[in-house]
Each structure stands twice: as C-alpha cells, then as structure tokens.
Image (spheres, grey):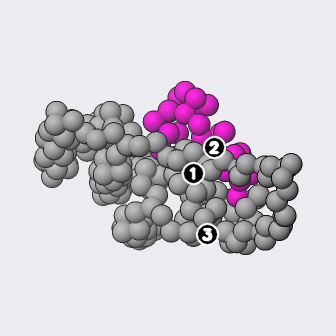
C-alpha cells in the first residue's frame, strides 16, 4: 500500500502528526470493527485490516518528535515504551480442498462471464467472497464481475443500474488502478450514450 493511499484511507493530510494518525485510526477502527457492523462483517473486516495496515505504515513513516534525554537513576526506572499497534491477523493458508474449490470456481466464473450470465457469475463470486473474506484475488474477481454486469447494463441502456454496478466494482477493489481506469472509460461511454441524438 502506498503512503498516499494510507493518508486517504485515514482521512489525513500529508503533514499529519503521530497523535493525529492515532486519533484518526482509533475513530475509524471503532466504526469499521466487524462487531460494529453485523450487517456486513466480512466487508468491515477487510476495511478494518486495510485501516490497520495504513496506520502502521504511517506511524513508521511519520517524523517522530525528539525524545527527551534522561539521566538514569539508581532509584527510578524509566517508563516502559508504548505498546506497538496490533499487527494485522495472520491470514490462514488455504487447505487443499479450499484451493481446489477456488480453482474450480474461477474456471466456472470465467465460463459464466464469457456466456454473459452475469447474475450467476456475481452470485458465485459473492459466495466465494463470503467464504474467503480476506482473499484479495477473490475481491478482484468480484469487482470484475460487477464491472461486466455494469457494461451489460450500459449496452441495455439501463444507465442507473450500470452506475450502481460500476460503483460496486470500485468499492470492492478500491486499490486496483487498472480497474479504476477501465471503469472511468465505462462511465465516459455511459455519458456519451445518454446524450440525445
């Protein structure tokens, strides 16, 4: 993750101080904690992990204030250093059965997209995303399925539905620059198609 993305995720300016970074992280972590989002815990969990990663990167990159020099005394112990932020949870390795499921699902997804059976493709990939909520590759497949459905709605001149699915694609895989560029072209095509004459 690039530092610019970290600042954007935490809603901070580039000159944010460590205490501002911590305050923003705590506020956003509370709102995106999976326990606080029972309607969509998987998406909240992914967002929570992204926030934690951004927080850790920014704290490492932020200029630290100079530490006061203290003379050690035989009677007084210095206070313990502050605890580091919690590391993101270790992602479990996929079992052979899960790897097989993911592989066969990918082949099925490719076939469904080629046949323009977008509703089934989306149902398949949303089920995978629910089963493997931390898998970035599956999030990418999900975003592509949403984008393909959006393109079909543009061809069908169902522009409102197209916008909904294109925006879902952007929200599902927000750091994928090539996807964002392709979706921007889709929106331009949609705007041209909406013009009369």
Q: Residue at x 39, y 39 (%)?
A: 133
Which element type, helix, strand or loop, lies under badge 3?
Answer: helix
> How far is disc 3 from disc 1 in space, using C-alphas?
15 Å
Q: Is residue 105 left or right of residue 27?
A: left
Inspect the magenta stretch and tell me whether residue 150 lies in it. Answer: no
Counting residues from the start of the chain, the first of labels 3 and 1 encountered is 1
Do tag 3 and tag 2 residues touch (Cβ < 8 Å)? Answer: no
Name the residue tied to disc 2. Answer: 29
Name the residue tied to disc 3. Answer: 61
Q: Is residue 38 above or below residue 3?
A: above
Q: Is residue 33 above or below residue 62?
A: above
Task: Decide: few, some or many residues near mark 3? Use Cα within 10 Å; few <14, some 14-19, many ≥20.
Answer: few
Counting residues from the start of the chain, the first of labels 3 and 2 encountered is 2
Residue range of the region highlighted in magenta in the rendering:
21-46
Q: Position of residue 123 (x, y in %)?
A: 29, 36
Magenta highlight: main SS: helix
Task: Decide: few, some or many residues near mark 1? Use Cα within 10 Å; few <14, some 14-19, many ≥20.
Answer: many
Q: Residue at x 53, y 29 (%)?
A: 39
Counting residues from the start of the chain, the first of labels 2 and 1 encountered is 2
For the C terminus, the image quarter is: bottom left
Q: Residue at x 60, y 40 (%)?
A: 32
Do tag 2 and tag 1 residues touch (Cβ < 8 Å)? Answer: yes
Inspect the magenta stretch and tell me whether residue 39 lies in it. Answer: yes
Q: Residue at x 76, y 59 (%)?
A: 20
Q: Nearer the viewer, residue 155 or 130?
A: 130
């Amino acid at each position: 993750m690039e530092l610019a993305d970290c600042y954007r995720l935490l809603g901070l300016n580039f000159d944010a101080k460590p205490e501002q970074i911590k305050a923003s992280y705590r506020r956003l972590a509370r709102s995106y904690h999976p326990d606080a989002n029972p309607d969509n815990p998987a998406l909240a969990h992914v967002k929570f992990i992204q926030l934690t990663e951004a927080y850790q990167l920014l704290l490492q990159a932020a200029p630290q204030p100079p530490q006061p020099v203290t003379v050690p005394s035989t009677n007084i112990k210095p206070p313990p250093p502050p605890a580091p932020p919690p590391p993101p949870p270790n992602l479990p390795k996929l079992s052979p059965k899960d790897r097989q499921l993911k592989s066969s699902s990918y082949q099925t997804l490719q076939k469904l997209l080629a046949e323009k059976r977008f509703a089934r493709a989306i149902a398949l990939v949303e089920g995978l995303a629910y089963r493997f909520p931390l898998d970035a590759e599956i999030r990418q497949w999900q975003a592509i399925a949403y984008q393909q459905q959006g393109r079909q709605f543009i061809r069908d001149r169902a522009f409102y539905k197209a916008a909904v699915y294109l925006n879902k694609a952007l929200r599902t895989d927000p750091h994928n620059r090539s996807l964002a560029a392709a979706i921007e072209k889709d929106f331009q095509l949609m705007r041209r198609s909406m013009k009369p004459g």
